[in-house]
Image (cartoon, grey):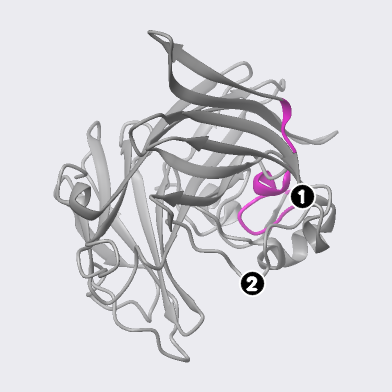
């Protein structure tokens, strides 16, 4: 009813990449990328992919070049951006920060997994590990991640505890980059966000039609939106494609607490061969560390020495008749 095993990938630029293969019956099957910040790579529900994967693939972190972050952006269901920068690369006080930070290219330590039992039956698969972002004269931030994959229910619970183990205050920039591709995204997909929100275009190319998806086309310019939600609420972003004929519909939903992650960004890329949307709850803006810190109106979260933050997110999905409602 449930299986979990540690694997090492052995081909091309993935060679040596540690991962955890998680397969709960009736749940979401996924590859947790232990050497890529404990992010969630390929993920499926009912045999259908939820994720989008880039041509770069899931490279071993030894291939990472901070000057060319996109060369190692493999996609997958979740890429964690941060912890010291989100947005374009920049320099602050002679220290350089790469685009979207180093986190998704850092190996985890203490990776372990277990099958949780209840009444002599498997109830969930739990995978956990720690990722440290540190340097000699820089930050020392530890993120402890726990992923719980339910058995009999397509649901993942993610809990992150982020702690400043250094002796100086550390600005914390954290964005959860969920990447949804076909068949979740298609011209018959609709995006619903709850609670009520206001939308602002972040890029000049952004249209007002953020909740609908046109057919793929060459030359599409990426669009970025910010959806402004009220604070201290349970929020969700649901993508539903009822027009997906083979399964009678497919749904994927992201849930989070706006008290922990008050900002929501959306990336839409509807190009030929690059067809996806990114749902991105965050605690920060996306202009980069330098711009955010220099803006007195920006609410930058600063972790004091020994301080910590907790972040709770859920990913749910369904196909066929199970996809009708209940995921908002």
Query: Which percent across, then down, holds residue 44?
Result: 45, 51
Q: Residues within 10 Å of mark 1 (few under 14, many from 20)?
A: some
Secondary structure, mark 1, is: loop
Q: 121 or 256, which is in the foreground?
A: 121
User: Residue at the spot x=66%, y=44% of the render?
Assistant: 103
> Which quadrant holds residue 204?
bottom left
Q: Which residues are magenta?
A: 93-110
Q: Earlier in the sequence, mark 2 or mark 1?
A: 1
Tell me the residue at 28%/75% (across/down): 213
The answer to whether one can see residue 161 in this image is: no
Residue 242 lies in quadrant: bottom left
Instruction: Name the foreground residue: 250 vs 101.
Output: 250
Image x and y of residue 158, in percent: 46, 32
Q: Which residue in the structure is indicated by mark 2?
A: 55
Q: Nearer the viewer, mark 2 or mark 1?
A: 1
Residue linked to disc 1: 9
* Image quarter in which the C terminus is found: top left
Farthest residue toward the bottom? 218
Report the side of 59 relative to 39 (left or right).
right
């Amino acid at each position: 009813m449930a299986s979990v095993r540690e694997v090492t990938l052995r081909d091309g630029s993935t060679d040596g990449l540690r991962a955890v293969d998680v397969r709960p019956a009736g749940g979401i099957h996924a590859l947790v990328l232990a050497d890529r910040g404990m992010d969630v790579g390929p993920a499926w529900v009912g045999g259908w992919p939820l994720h989008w994967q880039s041509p770069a693939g899931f490279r071993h972190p030894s291939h990472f070049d901070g000057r060319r972050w996109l060369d190692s952006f493999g996609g997958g269901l979740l890429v964690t951006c941060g912890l010291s920068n989100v947005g374009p690369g920049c320099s602050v006080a002679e220290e350089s920060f790469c685009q979207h930070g180093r986190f998704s290219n850092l190996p985890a330590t203490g990776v372990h997994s277990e099958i949780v039992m209840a009444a002599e039956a498997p109830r969930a698969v739990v995978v956990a590990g720690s990722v440290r972002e540190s340097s000699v004269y820089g930050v020392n931030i530890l993120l402890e991640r726990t992923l719980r994959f339910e058995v009999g229910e397509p649901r993942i619970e993610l809990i992150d505890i982020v702690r400043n183990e250094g002796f100086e205050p550390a600005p914390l920039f954290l964005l959860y980059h969920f990447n949804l591709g076909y068949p979740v995204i298609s011209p018959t997909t609709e995006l619903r966000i709850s609670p009520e929100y206001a939308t602002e275009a972040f890029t000049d190319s952004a249209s007002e039609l953020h909740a609908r998806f046109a057919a793929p086309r060459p030359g599409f310019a990426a669009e970025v939106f910010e959806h402004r939600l009220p604070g201290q609420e349970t929020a969700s972003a649901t993508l539903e494609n009822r027009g997906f004929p083979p399964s009678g519909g497919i749904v994927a939903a992201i849930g989070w607490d706006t008290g922990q992650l008050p900002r929501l960004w959306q990336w839409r890329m509807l190009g030929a061969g690059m067809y996806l949307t990114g749902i991105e709850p965050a605690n920060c803006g996306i202009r980069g560390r330098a711009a955010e810190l220099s803006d007195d109106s920006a609410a930058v979260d600063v972790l004091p020495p020994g301080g910590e933050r907790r972040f709770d997110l859920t990913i749910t999905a369904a196909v066929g008749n199970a996809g009708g409602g209940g995921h908002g």
